[in-house]
Image: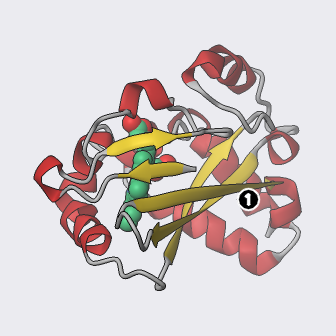
């Protein structure tokens, strides 16, 4: 649960929050930064969706919340993935094998909702994290094909940023075998 101040002179900064299940970031590194500065590390964000996302925040109406989904693929089931646990993620990645990849890898989806608060006009940002093993998803042929298509078309720099690049070929092989 995060709070962004409705201050456009500061670029709608993140001013408070309580973060249970961050995906490879922590509050300390982002607090006080503007919406665009928060996303500085995200490849293609500024060029492709920065402006429209910022406008969405700016024009958010009281009583008309919006939501979006963000996806990742992880190889440990830990929900709290602050950078402190980066070594666990790296070790799990080294341990991946073609036989185990379906069970070990999880599709991690964040449902993110943005709500304009009526009194202060600040923006409440809440995140609910869901995850499911790729093996469970791959049981459904349509879902396996969708995931395969996403992996095959995601720009390489985005796969790199999401930490999927090192095992993407193994995962693609696995999904092809399931079809
Ligand atoms: C329209 C709203 C938003 C859009 C379209 C958006 C989009 C994104 C995207 C595409 C990523 C990359 C994640 C990935 O590929 O795994 C990301 C990361 C991130 N987003 Fe957002 N986001 C939005 C709102 C917010 C808000 C309101 C916050 C408030 C704090 C936020 C904080 C973050 C953080 C901390 C990261 C990780 C950045 C890093 O790795 O340094 N996002 N966002």
Q: Position of residue 109 (x, y in %)?
A: 65, 58
Which quadrant, please, contains the C terminus?
bottom right
Taking depth in this image into account, of 60 and 127 the one nearest to the observer is 60
Residue indicated by mark 1: 175
Residue 44 visible in the picture? no
Say which quarter of the image contains residue 21.
top right
Depicted 155 relative to depicted 56: above or below: above
Is 86 situated left or right of 129 in this image? left
Q: Position of residue 48 (x, y in %)?
A: 23, 63
Q: Position of residue 84 (x, y in %)?
A: 61, 16
State the residue at coordinates (68%, 52%): 108
Q: How many marks?
A: 1
Residue 102 visible in the picture? yes
Circle 1 — which element? helix
State the residue at coordinates (70%, 20%): 94
Taking depth in this image into account, of 155 and 108 the one nearest to the observer is 108
* Residue lying at the far bottom of the rendered structure: 64
Q: Position of residue 98 (x, y in %)?
A: 79, 38
Is 121 situated left or right of 72 in this image? left
Depicted 39 relative to depicted 93: above or below: below
User: Callout 1 environment at 10 Å: few (<14), some (14 to 19), or many (20+)?
Assistant: many
Taking depth in this image into account, of 93 and 47 the one nearest to the observer is 47
Question: Looking at mark 1, is its residue's CB closer than 8 Å to ligand 1?
Answer: no
Taking depth in this image into account, of 63 and 31 the one nearest to the observer is 63
State the residue at coordinates (53%, 36%): 163
């Amino acid at each position: 649960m995060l709070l962004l101040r409705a201050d456009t002179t500061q670029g709608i900064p993140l001013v408070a929050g309580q973060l249970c299940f961050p995906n490879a970031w922590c509050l300390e590194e982002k607090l006080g930064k503007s919406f665009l500065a928060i996303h500085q590390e995200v490849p293609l964000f500024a060029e492709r969706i920065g402006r429209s996302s910022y406008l969405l925040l700016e024009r958010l109406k009281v009583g008309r919340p919006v939501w979006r989904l963000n996806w990742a693929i992880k190889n440990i089931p830990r929900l709290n993935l602050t950078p402190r646990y980066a070594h666990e993620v790296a070790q799990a990645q080294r341990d991946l094998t073609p036989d185990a990849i379906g069970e070990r890898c999880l599709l991690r989806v964040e449902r993110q909702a943005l709500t304009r608060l009526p009194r202060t006009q600040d923006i409440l940002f809440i995140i609910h994290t869901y995850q499911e093993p790729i093996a469970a998803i791959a049981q459904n042929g349509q879902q396996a094909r969708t995931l395969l298509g996403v992996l095959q078309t995601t720009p390489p720099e985005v796969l790199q940023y999401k930490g999927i690049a090192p095992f993407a070929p193994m995962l693609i092989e696995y999904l092809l075998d399931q079809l």
